[in-house]
Amino acid sequence: MKPIEKNYIKLRTILIGFIFSMFLSVIGARALYFQVFCSSWLSRKAANQYEGSLILPGERGTIYDANHREMALSIDVASIVAYPHNIEDPAATSEALNRALGIDVNLLKQRLTSDKSFVWVKRKVTPKEVKDVKAIGLKGIDFMPEHKRFYPNKTLAAQALGFSGIDGHGLEGIEYYYDSYLKGSTCRVRVLKDALKRGFDAEKNVIPDCSGNNLILTINYNIQHLAERALEEASVKFNAKSGMAIVMSPKTGAILAMAHYPFLNPNSFENFERDLWRNRSITDPFEPGSTMKIFSACAAIEFGGCSPNSIFFCENGKYRIGKNVVRDSHPHGWLSLQQIIKFSSNIGSIKVGEIIGPEYLYKTFRSFGFGEKTGIDCPGETSGGLSHYNRWSKIDAGTISFGQGVAVSALQLITAASAIANDGVLMA
């Protein structure tokens, strides 16, 4: 071989070796760069590719009665979920789920063929439904732990407690009023995915503690139970369409019982008419009728210079005010103030109101809290209806004295009556 050819081969070998060395150096430098300087970024990127997350509400706080007996609590339940990309035969899977859960097949097919990586099949299912679906062994179907609101005493104090929906938000009653206090913070639950973006092992996830606050009521379980039984008996006896009963401590104003009839089971509130959902003892105003006579009598003692023994002529059961005639159900002649209350004389109450005058009758009713909200921690409270005395006609002043032409709530009425039992001190 000639010297020139040898030198050429040697030069070419050196050049190829140099290029190869440079190539390896670049690869090594890039590897070093990614491993040292980009390791955290790559870790996050890999995690995002193989981990997903669900945002779930934290466990809702427990509601207790005055003696720390559970009135509303959250229990652990399972929800059935699906990963559409992992389902090989959506039609067959839909048919199987239809038999186990009773969900419409077309709706299931729509969910199982979704472009989403995760869909709900049915939330907060029963243990039997979990067992039935597990027994089928469907690919791409999994179970997610959640919390469900449970009312262990069923109908007891239902309208006062209210209820919460499937997403854990309070919808009625105390559950609604204290929703932000009771509900927990949102929890992020990790869901693992394979290389094809398919989820798995959702059932093994542990939901972190994001619990809400607990709440203690003044309601007493035993007193509430007695009040509801008495209310039910009275409603059935008198064939009443509905009824309300409240028990209040006059000294403190604490509500010991708040009962409604017909009853409502908040565990299945959707099966009851919406009219039964609300707390009618605070939301619904009504004419109080003869119960207002005791407050007219209070006005007579306070402003009219009367005593319980002051006497009034009750017109023998018939009294004309302008073009209007007021009658008593039983005629009476002379009655004392306390007898007017005892025999519930409308005419006697009008005579009391005439001595006091509209202004002081109005001021007395206002001082007992009529015409304004009590401020109870429940939603939808009515202020009732008590027009200003300047707007009263003579017949208005007369009928308002015995509870017609005025509207109150059951809570306003018992609050005012409790003030009399509490030596005139109104507890709000």
Image (tube, rainbow, N blue to C red):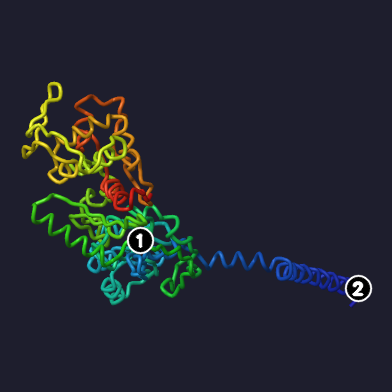
Q: Residue at x 32, y 61 (%)?
A: 219
In depth, the one of 177 and 120 nearer the eye is 177
Number of marks in the rendered image: 2
Q: Are marks 1 and 2 in contact (CB under 8 Å)?
A: no
Amino acid at dot 1: Thr
Q: Is residue 371 above or below residue 413?
A: above
Whichever of callouts 1 and 2 sits on the residue coming sooner in the sequence is: 2
Q: Residue at x 26, y 48 (%)?
A: 410
Amino acid at dot 2: Asn
Q: Quadrant of residue 233?
A: bottom left
Q: Residue at x 49, y 68 (%)?
A: 190
Instruction: Locate residue 342, reporting x and y percent.
Output: 15, 46
Residue denoted by label 2: 7
Q: Disc 1 or disc 2, which is closer to the eye?
A: 1
Q: Is residue 357 above or below residue 149?
A: above
Farthest residue to the right: give it. 3
- Which image quadrant: the N terminus? bottom right
Q: Which element is circle 1 on?
A: loop
Instruction: Locate residue 242, reporting x and y percent.
Output: 16, 50
In depth, the one of 266 and 65 nearer the eye is 65
Instruction: Locate residue 157, reporting x and y percent.
Output: 27, 60
Residue denoted by label 1: 218
In depth, the one of 380 and 255 nearer the eye is 255
Instruction: Locate residue 385, reporting x and y percent.
Output: 28, 36
